Image (spheres, rainbow, N blue to C red):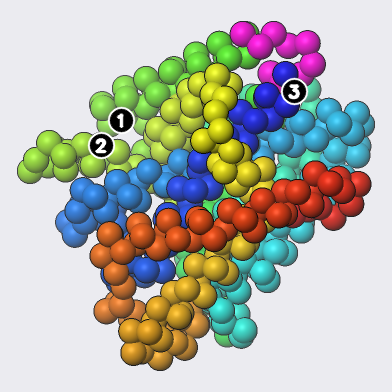
Amino acid sequence: MAAARIQSIDLLRGVVMILMALDHVRMYFGQGTWYAEPTNLATTTPLLFFTRWITHFCAPVFVFLAGTSAFLVGIKRENIRLLSQFLLTRGLWLILTEIVVVNFAWTFDSTYSFIILQVIWAIGISMVILSALVFLPDIVILLIGLALVFGHNLLDGIRVQGNAPADLLWYTLHQPQVVSVGSRLVNFVYPVLPWIGLMALGYVSGTLYRQGFPDEKRRRWFLTIGICATMLFLILRGLNLYGEPTHWVPQVSPIFTLMAFLNTTKYPPSLHFLLMTMGPALIFLWMSEFIRHKVTTPVLVFGNVPFFFYIIHLYLIHTFAMLWLAYSGRDWQEYILSAAVLRSGSLSSFGLGLGGVYLVWIVVMALLYPICRWYQMQKLNDPSKWWLSYL
């Protein structure tokens, strides 16, 4: 059953990794996507909106399951201090990797003139915080996680400007902002406060995988919590109650009204956003324990090597976009995304329609599978290599 539980987690993680790749292909290949927001109801189309919306599930599931995986690592180590040390060092490693390796994958700018702090950064900081939280009783970690997820929107009214240390700290915690730091632009895309809470909840959910915990009881917990979260989202969102800074209003057509209803805030993730995504995700996690089919094998491969997949797919997509730019008769250096290039708006006239985006996505996934399969086998054949746990 231990293997089956891991497969259920890997299946959910694999699904969101595939969806994440779709979003990133859209960003690099979609027409003018660096300067157009696909969830802007004034300019988007239903297909474009839902192509973006379905990928909203990726970051919450990624962070939540990182917390669950942390608990499972703790079971293997059987020592809370060793777990804390692992989370601290891995968290710091992820922060460094975001700034150095992931940023270069996004920009190909060797000068690092534009630094983007995104999901790997948020996971890294959340792991550093979790390395301290693991010494607390599980019930306390649960309460802290709930307080951050449900309470962080109380801070929405606090806004700061400037580059003072206190301002930068607030951008890190709760306010997305682009700031000039020396000669560089730094984009605080993923304020970490709600992500810390979500990882804490994921960690506590790992207790449902303890040896001897009844399988049916675990599944019932996931299904019940998933349904309750989804229903709470429908109630809070439907009545425009607490937990979302942007209210929805009826639109000119039913489909656009639905889009307005689902158009919740991701940066930082509002309570509505997290309920909207994690409710169905937990229901899927319940359902995934019943799924056993060869068709899911590639998905499990991707879910088994998430960080490796994340790094490789960014470099692959960006390289393909640069080649396509050159094939289109333009200067390939336009896709070296320095601060100056992004400010110039030169890429606003470049890109494919959604049909082309989906085709490139399929090609990218087909190429990634054998690479990820090879790395999965490396992990299985030689699990004693300590550095494999950091990739």
**The one of 96 and 222 positioned closer to us in this rendering:** 222
Residue 26's mark? Answer: none
Q: Position of residue 52 (x, y in %)?
A: 35, 51
Residue type beneath disc 2: Phe
Amino acid marked by disc 3: Ala
Q: Is residue 114 in view?
A: yes
Q: Earlier in the sequence, mark 3 or mark 2?
A: 3
Image height check: is 5 above or below 380? above
Residues shaded magenta: 208-216
Q: Name the image quarter holding the N terminus.
A: top right
Q: Which residue is mark 2?
A: 261
In terms of secondary structure, where does tag 2 sit? helix
Residue 316 placement, left or right of 54:
right
Q: Earlier in the sequence, mark 2 or mark 1?
A: 1
Name the residue rendered at 57%, 69% in the picture. 315
Is label 2 in contact with label 1 (beta carbons under 8 Å)?
yes
Could you tell me how many numbered marks the image carries? 3
Q: Are marks 1 and 3 in contact (CB under 8 Å)?
A: no
Kind of element beneath mark 1: helix
Give me the disc on residue 237.
Answer: 1
Q: Is disc 3 in contact with disc 2, using a CB cutoff of under 8 Å? A: no
The residue sitting at 71% across, 54% down in the picture is 374
Assign a secondary structure to mark 3. Answer: helix
Looking at the image, residue 180 lies above or below residue 172:
below
Tell me the number on the disc at residue 2: 3
Left or right: 226 with respect to 310?
Answer: left
- Circle 3 residues within 10 Å: few <14, some 14–19, many ≥20: few
Q: Kindly tell me whether residue 64 is visible in this rendering.
A: no
**Where is residue 25 drawn, in percent x and y?**
42, 62
Label 2 CA crowd tier, 10 Å (few <14, some 14–19, many 20+): some
Gap between marks 3 and 2 measured at Cα: 39 Å
Front-lying residue, 311 or 291: 291
